[in-house]
Amino acid sequence: MRARRLTWPLALATSIALPVSLAAPAAARPPAQSPAASPAVSPSAAPAGPAGACDPTRTAPVYRGKVPSPEKVLGFELGERPVSSAESDRYLETVAAKSERVVSGTLATSAQGRPLKYAIAGRPGLMSKAGLAKVRREAALLRDPRTPDALARQIVRRGVPILWVTGNVHGNEPSGTDAALRVLRDLGDREDCAAEAILQNALVVILPTQNPDGREAGTRQNAYGFDMNRDWFARTQPETDGKLAMLGRYPPALYIDAHEMGGTSYFFPPNADPIYHETPEQAIGWINGLYGAAMAEEFTRRGIDFFNRDVYDLFYQGYGDSVPTTGFHAAGMTFEKGNASPYPEKVEEQYLTQWVTLSAAAGQRQRVLTEWRRMTVDAYEQGKAGKLEPNQIYNPPNQIDRQVPDRKVRHYFLRADDPAKRDEVRTVVRRLQRMGVRVERLVRSLTVPDFKPYGGSEAKTTLPAGTYWITMAQGRKHWIQAMLGEDSYTPFPYFYDVTAWSLPLLANVAGGSSGASLKPRAVPAAPVPAPRPGHEGRAPRLAVLQLSATSSAARESVGWLRHRLDREWRLPFTLLTPADVAAGGLAGVEVLVTPDGPASSAYDALGETGRTALQEWTRGGGRYVGWQGGAQLAARLGLTTATLSEPTSDIPGTLIRAKVDADSPLAADVGGAVWNFTAYDLVMKASGGVAVAYPEADSPDWSVSGFERGASELGGTAAVVDQPAGEGRSVLFAAEPNFRAFTDGTAKLLRNAVLGPDPEREAAPRAGEAAEAARRAAELPSPESPIRVSVRAADAAGAASVLRSVGASWAERRRGGVVHYVIDNPRGLPTDHHPFAGRLPSLLAGAGIDPVAVTLP
């Protein structure tokens, strides 16, 4: 997966060469020699550093012998094979028990009951309860813009930055765990100057395994099917939530997230564009100029293959690098090692990047603390002035297609006067509060001269008492904008993930912003507790049909639903397969929910017996609720007259406002509109039973958050249909209503579909309409997590040549001068494990093609 390789000037060696005065005297070192040919070089075998400096990687390790080696505890050395979660925990606890420099704890328990163990390492004087409390207190003071400058300078002179090392958020990417355990052992037991330099100048938090359930199962996702590297702002999973709670206690100036990818190369920052506009500029300076430069120098010296400024962006505010950066002003960094390399090499290179980065931070202790503090003060000053950061390009020749509007934003408001939205509003407020955002409530009504409601235009508006007020004049300004901003202002069309995540829009609650200088009468909002799970009324006999056991889309969609049913709604259900349906599994079921998945293979897997059983069950009085592939299956079975077609637009994870039929039972407590999350979903049209519809694109009701090209094709189409099917009912969503379990607004539609009453009976649809819908559904492809590339018609030949060069197969569609390529990804591989997906942007650029959009799985 090699891409552009960058070489940094050797003058940057000063970023990681630590003066001997900062640490213990250096141990004897062998004379300097040329870099080793093999990329897997153990620290003890590395060449010696320059005289007069303590080189982080060329200093020979000297162990005290207090901490037993991994071989003595586990029976093998780290890197020989992946440790299990239990083995990782055992060695972590051993180091903590044997070393006065290390303490340990558990920050969360996984869905399957496994602990998430962490260790904290530092000089012994910091490891007492009082010492750790002092570090936390000083970090909190530096993060508070109200702290007097004189006190902040005192803390900078004597304090230490908090540096995080984490691994294995994707369970099938194990090497970061083993490397982190090596770092832990070295910090716990080494007494040479390189280790002492880190210990004396930093507090290091090590979380070797972020996903123990996935590690044991060998799956990317956790036990509920969540990609937890997308869960950071929503915190739906206990593993993510516990980690962020710990980050709040020990806020990072550095956060390392160790991953694996396809191939044999190594990625570390600088990142690819786009980078989210509110990412602090100083943090990017650290990432690129301090840490990226140090790693590039070390890898170049050793002859290890690496790349950067490609594939891995810093845009979506739900990653393990973007959230530490925007939310905590850390240098949040993703490291990726090719999984085709031998395991010892993977662990060695992961260890190398972790150690070099920790050393670089420790070597610049006062600079890091000073600039970390400065970011908080700058954020406050920007918020007070109402200044939003502009979009920037960090990797020419990329160009900005869309700039952040030149509009001041000093305040956000969340309406709290709709009892039906109480829970959703409280969820948004809780998510803000738990990231340290100051939230207040108006004690008197407030007239705002320039109030801009979400999806609307500025107007003089009076907000009632009780409205939540979030001032931008606080240290968390960047995070507030990331979470409450109406749009992400995608700078140009490259998408590693989705482009919309505004909390109020996801929750479908009312609110807006103002740039005026206001002095509201307000009091601090009480901390919002965790919501109480459960539901009202009788629970139906519920089943969930998983269309495929191997499809990534099916596993995730079903997993998100299982989490919602188990943890929030507390609705018992039976999980069915197509084979179960054919074997009579629908007996006694009242509601069948069919999430996304491959409809064609499920249709075949049902067989004639299963298809007949599902048709007869629905027409005999069952309630079928399905979306995406589940909706396509219903159409193929003749359970709806809604027709489905492939999109010809580029909508790579975008929120579009839709109108809700007030007479539909799905509308209960939803309101007249809902923000619908859609990502290249099928276009659904129906002549009757439309419960939720997109307005026409030229309507004042039309509003979009996130990137779109050609979304007007959705104007006037159905987002949700609710139609009779014999004596039963078919409720179909064109898009995922429970995306990553954080689209709470449309999840309420889904809840109503499962628990709500039936609508008034409509006339049965004509058989010919259902047959036509079935015919058209049968013609639809069922691609598994495809790659999508859209180019102008003039570039079509060149784009096709690029696709042929990597051995791609694709379907091609043309609309309005744009050619859309839907590229097969039969195993549903994510970008970082795909053989060519990540290289497509560079290959297209190399062919002189400026794409309309590139969307990676």
Image: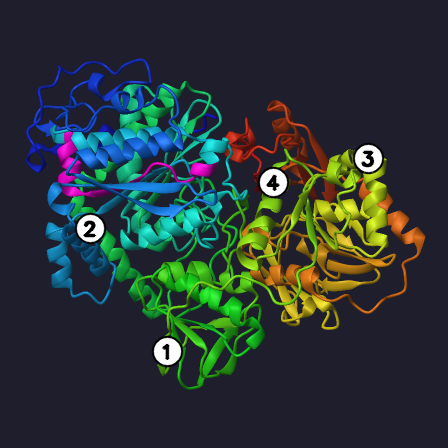
Residue 640 appears in the rendering: no
In-front residue for pair 269/228: 228
Choose the circle earlier in sequence order: 4 or 2. 2
The residue under label 4 is 555
Choose the circle earlier in sequence order: 3 or 2. 2
Choose the circle earlier in sequence order: 4 or 3. 4
Say which of marks 3 and 1 sits in front: 3
Left/right placement of residue 172 relative to residue 305 reads: right
Say which of marks 1 and 2 sits in front: 2
The residue under label 3 is 607
Q: Residue at x 32, y 51 (%)?
A: 246
The residue under label 2 is 369
Say which of marks 4 and 3 sits in front: 3
Q: Position of residue 168 (x, y in %)?
A: 41, 35
Alpha-carbon neighbours of circle 3 within 10 Å: few (<14), some, or many (≥20)? some
Q: Helix or strand or loop: what does disc 1 sit on?
A: loop
- Indicate whether 334 appears above or below 809: below
Left/right placement of residue 404 relative to residue 362 reads: right
Q: Helix or strand or loop: what does disc 2 sit on?
A: helix
Task: Look at the image and give the residue range highlighted in magenta.
Answer: 194-213
C-alpha separation, residue under disc 4 versus residue under disc 3: 21 Å
Q: Quadrant of residue 207?
A: top left
The residue under label 1 is 517
Q: Are marks 4 and 1 in contact (CB under 8 Å)?
A: no
Q: Are marks 3 and 2 in contact (CB under 8 Å)?
A: no
Q: Residue at x 14, y 36 (%)?
A: 197
Say which of marks 4 and 2 sits in front: 4
In-front residue for pair 644/553: 553
Q: Amino acid at mark 1?
A: Ser
Colour scheme of the rendered structure: rainbow
